[in-house]
Image (spheres, coloured by chain):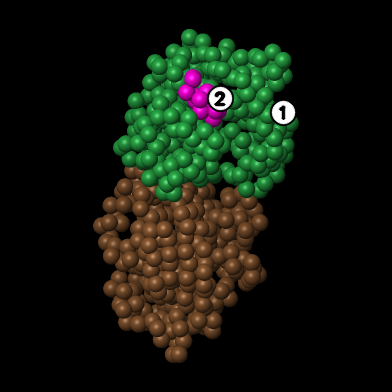
Chain colours: A green, B brown
């Protein structure tokens, strides 16, 4: 079992009604890898600049994340995002985005990363995702995330990238936008016609829905009284989801395992939002995950 | 077991991307009563005008709904609502509202209606809700629904009305607006401090969440490929929820029964939206409800 993730490695400056942080470690690949690290061996592929130090690498390594394919670009600066949230934590307001070293990124995978059983193509330019995907032909499960930016500016590339993967994870609004189909179930079916056999609609605080050829499954969000920073929740969900599937050796789309993976994804996302950036997940334990999964089961269970 | 509902009895003219209907039977009390009628004896309290005919009464009576407290106001016209939905079926656009006979409505309950075990105060002016509530002192469970209009224009009356009931059902955005608390779990707790021991947050297509002193429960929406008209879904949810509780004799807030009631509420709402107005629920059978409940259980079930 092994999992390769390509995506952004970033410094994030974030303000919410509950506090703020300057230049904390973030990015889709980082949030994903930390969440997945509780279930399997995960390696990160992505570029950083001179400003990326030992402390940041150490945070990943402490969770057992393989960092050999984190490429340091001399004279470059790490991807930077500044944003804020109002009281509606479902909506991120972007104040500044600097691609920096991501502007010229050409993913180079080590043989070990290429040989991964599961691959997650985090939200980056679709042609970069295709480049990574082409290097990982042995993977049993390749999943892709994206965003409205690429739907609007690189639709053809994105559709090509989607057609080459097994699983698409996307926000529900973006699924509707991509397929121009307002009904979520129909939107998911339209995606399946492009190629993927698994579609996951992320619904923010409302949870997530899973679509497969066998049918669908929906799970509400884990209700929390204290949400401090939602940044990275979707990537933590993806990390819990794919990390669990890889760790359980369930890459073939077994329905029972996919549902359990949805629950683990929700649990990891729920921890992610309890504190800023990676602060909560980086001090998380597997016991806490299992306890919350059991609580989640109780909170969603009903008898006929 | 018996249930009294007070609320609007209306003619609705509705347009959605999937069709339109002119002056079809609608209103919160009507949608509620039809849904509840599958589980218990339900009677409607509310005014209608000369334009309300035998056909409308017959539609209710065919489902066993008691209509003796439907008051015909001579020379008056029935409450009328005209609205439309764009592709985002979560948002109703109101084009015309005519209170008509509701403008001077003074609820008069027969002794049988006053003696109900469960009472639902549908979304009408809060002082009218209080007037009905005061006439039903023997009820074991009194629930109230409201809307943003009353939060904005009659907040003090609404808070007084809420403090006098056992259960509040409200859209999640309205719960946040009422309590000025952006976090849903905290908003629900703030409502409980006003009096109700049960709070249900309706979340449209995303399902619903239940809050009690014991904790919370969340259920996703039943995913449908064909949604034609969401008008009345919230009232059908309430009808399934409270109708089940009354029919099961579960008015004391038993957690297991409340969860089951949430599932029945979701099932009734899911049928409501499959066709315009009351068209789907008025031809529904109890077997279809039980089949969908079983399907719903399968669609939300996961194993730890």
Residue drawn at x 48%, y 9% as measured from the top left: A111
Chain that bears disc 2: A
Chain that bears disc 1: A
- Which stretch did the figure color magenta? A121-132
Determine if residue B214 is in view.
yes
- Left or right of B224 on screen, residue A83: right
Q: Give above or below for B96 relative to A5.
A: below
Pick the front one: A165 or B106 = A165
Pick the front one: B248 or B224 = B224
- Left or right of B291 on screen, residue A39: right
Residue drawn at x 35%, y 53% as measured from the top left: B226
| Residue B131 numbered tag | none
Q: In whole angstroms, how far apart are the C-alphas of marks 1 and 2?
A: 18 Å
Instruction: Identify the residue position indicated by label 1 in the image.
Output: A23
**Residue that lies at the very extreme toward the bottom in this rendered image:** B74
Residue A229: give x, y in percent of width and height. 64, 38
| Earlier residue among tags 1 and 2 | 2
Callout 2: 10 Å neighbours few (<14), some, many (20+)? many
Q: Give above or below for B261 relative to A280.
A: below
Q: Give above or below for B22 relative to B53.
A: above
Residue drawn at x 59%, y 25% as measured from the top left: A8
Determine if residue B272 is in view.
no
Instruction: Identify the residue position indicated by label 2 in the image.
Output: A7
Residue A137: give x, y in percent of width and height. 40, 16
Callout 1: 10 Å neighbours few (<14), some, many (20+)? some
Residue drawn at x 31%, y 79% as measured from the top left: B55
Q: Which image quarter: residue A62? A: top right
Residue A27: give x, y in percent of width and height. 61, 28
């Amino acid at each position: 079992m092994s999992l390769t993730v390509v995506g952004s490695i970033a410094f994030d400056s974030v303000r919410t009604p509950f506090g703020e942080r300057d230049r904390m470690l973030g990015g889709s690949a980082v949030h994903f890898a930390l969440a997945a690290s509780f279930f399997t061996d995960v390696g990160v592929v992505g570029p950083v600049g001179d400003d990326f130090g030992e402390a940041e690498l150490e945070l990943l390594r402490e969770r057992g994340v393989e960092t050999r394919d984190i490429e340091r670009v001399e004279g470059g600066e790490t991807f930077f995002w500044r944003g804020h949230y109002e009281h509606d934590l479902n909506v991120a307001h972007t104040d500044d985005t600097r691609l920096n070293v991501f502007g010229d990124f050409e993913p180079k995978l080590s043989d070990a990363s290429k040989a991964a059983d599961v691959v997650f193509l985090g939200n980056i330019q679709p042609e970069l995702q295709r480049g990574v995907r082409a290097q990982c032909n042995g993977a049993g499960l390749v999943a892709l995330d994206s965003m409205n930016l690429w739907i609007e500016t690189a639709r053809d590339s994105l559709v090509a990238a989607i057609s080459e993967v097994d699983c698409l994870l996307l926000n529900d609004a973006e699924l509707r936008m991509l397929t121009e189909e307002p009904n979520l179930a129909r939107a998911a079916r339209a995606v399946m016609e492009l190629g993927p056999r698994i579609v996951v609609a992320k619904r923010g605080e409302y949870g997530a829905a899973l679509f497969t050829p066998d049918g669908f499954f929906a799970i509400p969000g884990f209700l929390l009284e204290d949400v401090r920073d939602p940044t990275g929740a979707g990537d933590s969900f993806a990390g819990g989801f794919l990390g669990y599937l890889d760790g359980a050796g369930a890459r073939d789309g077994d329905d029972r395992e996919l549902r359990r993976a949805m629950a683990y994804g929700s649990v990891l996302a729920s921890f992610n939002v309890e504190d800023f950036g990676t602060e909560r997940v980086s001090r998380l334990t597997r016991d806490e995950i299992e306890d919350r999964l059991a609580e989640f089961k109780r909170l969603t269970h009903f008898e006929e």
